[in-house]
């Protein structure tokens, strides 16, 4: 029970940190430059051109409406994490507008600000996806569409984001529109790379003669497990033992050093993997 409680606290700490990163990227770099590369925040940038509300206020209103629709169409199983992200993000943006008003871009370097407007929310989205949460907003629309139709969700979201970018080209100037197009193309790439990095583990195939010191170190010091089976060398026909195990990047360095110390003649291969499912690692959704 206590372990589950600590895991929940850790998850919501990571989610809250991700929301803060996302809102800093949106409020400090995206809103002042009118970057509109998708999502509710991008829609808010476009809509604020026609209404007297600020982008943060429009973001809050639209997110709250979508949150209500989420509970109506998806029910109570809609997701506590998504609801938490939606509420915290919207409220935080409104607070930032009051406490730290932005009257224009932070710098005169538009390209530099575009990079931060892409990187911070993209890294935040990766952190949220890693914790099985979402940023709400248009993701809620995607969840509704997924439940009530056979439409491909990624294509639907891309179409929505593209429509917002096209609208930005007409509402603002072509320069802002082109920057928004670049942001749309780069956002998915950064998210994918960030998720892959966060999920990175290393898979060991160790061929040795004395498995006990290595297995003991894996289990007692690194607190991992391993699979062991007997094999035969194709050239020498001598008996060998093959150890299979998976480590996170820090543990991988320690295991490599230990293998080289206790059995320098051991042959081992280390393979990077971002999809490890099972006990001690990410569980399948």
Image: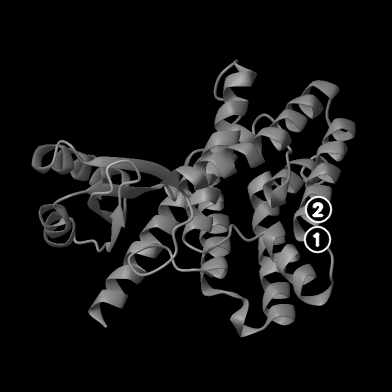
Question: How many marks on residues?
Answer: 2
Residue drawn at the location 66% of the way across and 33% of the way down: 186
**Which image quadrant: the C terminus?**
bottom right
**Which image quadrant: the N terminus?**
bottom left
Q: Toward the viewer: 71 or 232? A: 232
Q: Toward the viewer: 21 or 97? A: 21
Decide: few, some or many residues near mark 1? Use Cα within 10 Å; few <14, some 14-19, many ≥20: few
- Under tag 2, what secondary structure? helix
Q: Can residue 96 be seen in this view?
A: no
Q: Residue 46 carries which label?
A: none
Residue drawn at the location 58% of the way across and 60% of the way down: 134
- Under tag 1, what secondary structure? loop
Q: Is residue 113 left or right of residue 278?
A: right
Q: In this view, does 82 lie to the left or right of 247?
A: right
Q: In this view, does 165 lie to the left or right of 2?
A: right
Q: Toward the viewer: 181 or 60? A: 181
Residue drawn at the location 60% of the way across and 16% of the way down: 109
**Residue 150 occupies quadrant:** bottom right
**Looking at the image, do the residues carrying marks 2 and 1 touch, with CB atoms under 8 Å apart?**
yes
Q: Is residue 66 visible?
A: yes
Q: From this viewpoint, which residue is outermost toward the top?
A: 108
Q: Name the residue under label 1.
A: 152
Tell me residue 93's x, y (percent).
Answer: 55, 49
Q: Mark 2 points at which residue?
A: 155
Task: Reply above or below: 20 against 81.
Answer: above
Decide: few, some or many residues near mark 2? Use Cα within 10 Å; few <14, some 14-19, many ≥20: few
Tell me residue 94's x, y (percent).
Answer: 56, 51
Tell me residue 181's x, y (percent).
Answer: 77, 31
Tell me residue 151's x, y (percent).
Answer: 84, 64
Q: Distance between the residues labelled 2 and 1?
A: 5 Å
């Amino acid at each position: 029970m206590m372990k589950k409680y600590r895991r929940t606290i850790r998850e919501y700490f990571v989610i809250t940190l991700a929301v803060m990163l996302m809102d800093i990227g949106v409020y400090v770099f995206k809103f002042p430059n009118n970057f509109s590369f998708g999502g509710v925040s991008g829609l808010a940038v476009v809509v604020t051109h026609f209404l007297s509300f600020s982008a943060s206020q429009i973001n809050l209103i639209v997110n709250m409406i979508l949150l209500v629709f989420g509970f109506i169409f998806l029910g109570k199983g809609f997701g506590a994490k998504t609801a938490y992200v939606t509420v915290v993000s919207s409220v935080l943006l409104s607070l930032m507008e009051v406490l730290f008003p932005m009257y224009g871009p932070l710098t005169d370097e538009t390209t530099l600000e575009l990079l931060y407007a892409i990187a911070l929310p993209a890294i935040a989205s990766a952190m949220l996806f890693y914790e099985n949460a979402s940023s709400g907003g248009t993701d809620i629309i995607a969840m509704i569409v997924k439940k009530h139709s056979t439409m491909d969700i990624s294509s639907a979201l891309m179409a929505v984001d593209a429509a917002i970018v096209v609208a930005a080209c007409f509402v603002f100037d072509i320069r802002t529109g082109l920057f928004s197009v670049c942001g749309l193309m780069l956002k998915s790439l950064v998210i994918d790379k960030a998720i892959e990095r966060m999920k990175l583990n290393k898979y060991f195939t160790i061929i040795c003669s004395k498995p006990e010191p290595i297995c003991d170190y894996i289990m007692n010091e690194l607190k991992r497990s391993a699979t062991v089976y007997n094999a035969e060398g194709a050239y020498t026909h001598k008996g060998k033992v093959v150890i299979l195990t998976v480590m996170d990047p820090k543990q991988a360095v320690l295991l490599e050093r230990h293998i080289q110390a206790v059995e320098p003649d051991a042959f081992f291969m280390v393979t990077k993997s971002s999809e490890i499912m099972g006990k001690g690692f990410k569980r399948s959704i």
